[in-house]
Image (spheres, helix red, strand yellow):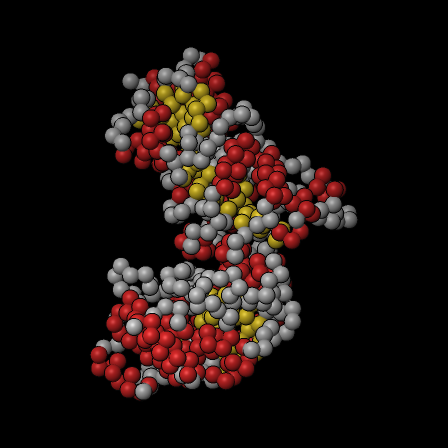
Amino acid sequence: MSRLIQAWFSDIILSMSLKETAKEIRKNVLKMTFKSQTSHIGSSLSCIEILTVLYFKILKVDLKNPFSEKRDRFVLSKGHAVASLYSTLAQKGFFPLKELDCYCKDGKKMPGHSTKRSMPGVEVTTGALGHGLPIATGMALALKKDKRNQRVFVLMSDGECDEGSNWEAALFAGHHKLDNLTSIIDYNKLQAFGRTNKVLNLEPLAKKWESFGWQVKEVDGHNLEDLEKNLSKIPFKKGKPSLLIAHTVKGKGVSFMENKLEWHYKNLDQKLLEKALKELS
Amino acid sequence: MALQKPGSEAFGKSLKRTFMRTAFINTLIKLAEKDKRIYLLTGDLGFSVFETFAKKFPERFINCGVAEQNMMGVAAGLALEGKKPYVYSIVPFVTMRCLEQIRNDVAYQNLDVKIVGVGGGVSYGELGATHHAMEDAGIMRLLPNFQVFCPGDPLEAEKLMLASYKSPSPSFMRLNRGGDKMIHKRGDKIEIGKPFIMEKGKTGAIVVNGIFLRIGKEVSDNLKSLGHEFKFISLPTLKPVDRNSLYKELKDYKVIFSMEEHNVLGGLGTLISETMAERGWSGRIKKIALPDEFFSKTGKAEYIRRKYRMTSEQIIKTILKTITKK
């Protein structure tokens, strides 16, 4: 019986449009953060389309063998947005959606920052910013040395570009011509205590990365088609690591959260959850 | 003068090789010949030591540049893909400069990354406190999953390297800077976590690591000629330690001298104090170690040791004073 339901369920998921999939992932993030009364909602909502396109269109994954050597690797460097990763992985079928209820619950295995193998599909432990890119760079280097075709993708935040370790990694990846490495910056223009251009201006961001030896493209980070179009053609240039700057909105999809700094911290109450879900339905 | 090409013979011979680093690199080369997973990452150091490795395994020698945070992250990434990276620099740079990477990327993920730091204690004396390693053992002991080694001669370095190679745990090994004398006999059985009894004696016990294997040996030999026989123990592992064995070796003594080139807080002396106090031993532990301060003047290692009453003659005096005090 349960297998039948599961099959029926995956049929539904398969037939869902990418837009609907993203919407479901977004709704589950809201439910998870409400149930666990946790924060980082705005950061999780800004990268939903990026994760949807990656997991449903770009990454070669193996649901039966989530850590198969033949998989593409994905590193969530902005580890605080892990609710959106769990939600995406569950939607993709790495584990049952029901398990999302365990998010940040006492004694369960889904912490509020990306933690290696906490769930099938979670590759790397992050949480402190500026760690994901160096690790992904090492993974890409190992795959290159072994002449293997698998690719490594990293999702970074804009705020974490303040960390010097990223620029060390940028220099290294450019020097070693790691064209199997793609980083995406979720450029939602808001960091923990202010707007990125006011806290520590990153601009000209594209030029900075280009000067470090990366091939850079920019995209509307909520436009599923454009994201897919860009990420389908990587490396952007042979012999160079690729960087996709995805312009996004923090808190995307929920009007009262969009572009609001406080939704880096606030929790949802029942009333606000209902309001948010209504906007999405 | 024309620059010599790295890997060329002239380049390798241009400087006299130091002993403990040579033991490290020779052991690594032997391992790397058989194990293709081994990579050597350096933060732009290793001149006159790593040329042979670089020449033999150019694909597995990576000079990461002066960028230790990235180097440690890259090592974690390599380990996640099944490689066995050895990461090298001067102690402060390969531990404290990238400590959060070591903690989160390596220790927390429990990855097979071996960190090797050169310049234990004040061996880079005249270069100043930025280059001194006084805190590394204490800091690295605090990281779960880590093995921490402070070998005292080339044999201990080699044996502990071979033993830790077989373990998938991350590890940190602190090497002395200089041409360290071989203190052990070739066949001595050095094991991770085990105290090694160098001498037997009844007057008291001396426990050493690092450079104090040599200095402590001088102390112990001199005391013996004065009629004071000490049990002399080398404990080149700081973690994990077989504390019960250590306790058993020490419990019958009223006074224990620990000797290390490290801050008096957090290293070998602390380890012994914890071990003995936890098991109800009552006696005195006298810690010969660096005081909790930066040495801000200039001076070679020997000068700094003299300043802190850590030369063999000074230690002998301290010991004689301690054991004759009623």
Q: Is residue A113 visible?
A: yes
**In the displayed structure, does residue B278 sit left or right of residue A139?**
left
- Above or below residue B263? Residue A93 is below
**In the displayed structure, does residue A129 sit left or right of residue B252?**
right
- Above or below residue B251? Residue B47 is below
The one of A252 and B203 positioned closer to us in this rendering = A252
| Residue B80 placement (x, y as % from top left) | 49, 56
Q: Residue at x 40, y 25 (%)?
A: B206
| Residue A177 placement (x, y as % from top left) | 63, 65
Q: Residue at x 33, y 86 (%)?
A: A280
Q: Which corner quadrant holds the C terminus of chain A? A: bottom left
Q: Residue at x 57, y 72 (%)?
A: A242
Q: Which corner quadrant holds the N terminus of chain A? A: bottom left
- Above or below residue B79? Residue B221 is above
Total labels: the figure holds 0
| Residue B188 placement (x, y as % from top left) | 51, 26
| Residue B192 placement (x, y as % from top left) | 44, 35
- Above or below residue A167? Residue A262 is below
**In the displayed structure, does residue A162 sit left or right of residue A142?**
left
Question: Which residue appears farthest toward the right when viewing the image?
Answer: B2
Instruction: Please identify the quarter of the rendering in which residue A39 is found.
Output: bottom left
The one of A185 and B1 positioned closer to us in this rendering = A185
Q: Residue at x 51, y 42 (%)?
A: B165
Q: Is residue B314 visible?
A: no
